[in-house]
Amino acid sequence: MREATGELLWRSAGDGLVEGRLKRLVLQQTTETSDAGTQMINSLPGMNFTVDDFYVGEKALGQLEVKARNEKGIWQLENLGIKNPDGYLKGKGNWQNLGKHLTHLEFELGANDIGKMLTRLGYVDAVRRGQAKMTGGLDWEGPLTTIHYPTLTGNLNVSAEKGQFNKLEPGIGKLLGLISLQSLPRRLTLDFRDVFSDGLAFDSIEGKLVVKKGIMRTVEPLRIKGPAAQIEMQGETDLKNETQNMRVTVRPEIGGAAAMGAAIVHPVVGVATLVANTILRDPLNRLFSYRYQVTGSWSDPQVDKEGQKEVKPPVTPEEGKKP
């Protein structure tokens, strides 16, 4: 602990209770772990306090609220709350030491402005604007303070809207770089230079994911809808080794552009194309899709282009009746 200002009160009944309010709390950021640290759960007291200005290293995270109690080796986290103008974190769970360390955590993470929230976490200019929410429940063997990826298991739901990924250096943001597709080799950006050159803009991102023993898989394709393209990602990624095996499908958003182009050449044809495109829910942008198999590490992905696939339009009832 580097700095703490405020008032805390210690109550010695039972396993003890720390309560009060701090104006400021700054914790050192460390990656070191020790057996002594993991054994602290046996003597952790209950907690009920608020920090007005909470920092981890240089990261200003906002207001912190913690409420927890210790019940014979099981530290029950009843409420963990962090909030600031850019977003919030809500969590609850437990950390037990009955023969071995086990952690269960349920959480909701929300961003009012994805870009500003990521800047607070140290990823400056990674995303412009945008709103997002992630909810889930996770379990792992080990203390609450350190995720053990080989045993990490649970589920995640992700949604975001109205933002744009900026250009990211390979490896920066890790999973963020994977979703933004900007860590992929030049082959993909040559196919869609106008889509990825200034960062992928998105209207919405939706995904449901499961994690089993550190391997995260898509329950259904993670879908990114944007003004220039629709993207689907399906497969798995190893959170510990930072590798992936994903299929990425890119469908250029060409329906409106094609209709407008036709209207310039021939107004009647252009109007007919636009009406048909609207009624049939943009069949033009589904006429061709481009598929990529993405493997290797997050920082140096290997891409196998599967090529262009023609998607036939649906058969109308009248056509289905023809011999």
Image (cartoon, rainbow, N blue to C red):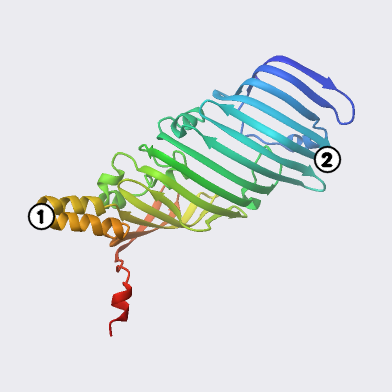
Q: Quadrant of the N terminus?
A: top right
The image shows residue 236, relative to residue 158, as above or below, that is below
Asked whether, in this view, residue 122 is left or right of residue 253, the answer is right
The answer to which of marks 1 and 2 sits earlier in the sequence is 2
Q: Amino acid under label 1?
A: His
The reply to whether residue 299 is visible in this rendering is no
Badge 1 vs badge 2, beta-carbon distance below 8 Å: no
The reply to whether residue 286 is visible in this rendering is yes
Return the mark for residue 73: 2
Q: Residues within 10 Å of mark 1 (few under 14, many from 20)?
A: few
Asked whether, in this view, residue 270 is left or right of residue 58, the answer is left
Q: Quadrant of the C terminus?
A: bottom left
Q: Residues within 10 Å of mark 2 (few under 14, many from 20)?
A: some
Where is residue 242 shown, x and y percent of the image?
Answer: 51, 49
Where is residue 78 shown, x and y percent of the image?
Answer: 74, 36
Where is residue 144 shown, x and y percent of the image?
Answer: 69, 39
